[in-house]
Amino acid sequence: MDPFIGEIRLLPFAYCPADWHVCDGSRLPVQQYQALYSLLGDRFGPYDGMKTFALPKMDAPANMKYCIALVGIYPPRD
């Protein structure tokens, strides 16, 4: 089953799988992740002229990671 774009999961690994990114406050390019940006906007970091946006920063227990889906199904609005 494909995840929703922007879905966050706590995974029992020290890494995130392909097409997922650790929720560590990293900045991603808007052009490369337009769908994710349309959901998150600049909610987790300062506005920088629409070049990048920040992912949430979430601390996980030891040997676990919070991961956010970069690709998948765009969540319906209804």
Image (cartoon, rainbow, N blue to C red):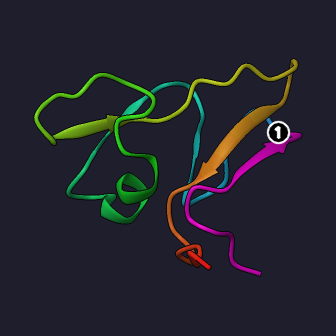
Q: Decide whether residue 8 is among the magenta residues.
A: yes
Indicate whether 32 appears above or below 4.
above
| Point 60% across, 37% down: residue | 22
Element type where label 1 sits in the image: loop
| Point 45% across, 56% down: residue | 39
Q: Quadrant of the N terminus?
A: bottom right
Q: How many marks?
A: 1
How far from the left and from the top, in percent, is residue 6?
A: 57, 56
Front residue (pair 76, 63): 76
Magenta-colored span: 1-12
Q: Is residue 50 left or right of 68 when viewed as pictured?
A: left
Q: Quadrant of the C terminus?
A: bottom right
How far from the left and from the top, in percent, is residue 31?
A: 20, 57
Residue position marked by numbered label 1 in the rendering: 13
Q: Amino acid at mark 1?
A: Phe
How far from the left and from the top, in percent, is residue 34?
A: 30, 61
| Point 48% across, 35% down: residue | 55
How far from the left and from the top, in percent, is residue 40?
A: 45, 47
Q: Please, what is the dominant secondary structure of the magenta stretch?
A: loop
Residue with the most extreme left position: 49
Q: Residues within 10 Å of mark 1 (few under 14, many from 20)?
A: few
Indicate whether 26 appears above or below 36.
above
Q: Decide whether residue 56 is among the magenta residues.
A: no
Q: Is residue 60 left or right of 71 when viewed as pictured?
A: right
Residue with the most extreme front position: 78
| Point 83% across, 44% down: residue | 11
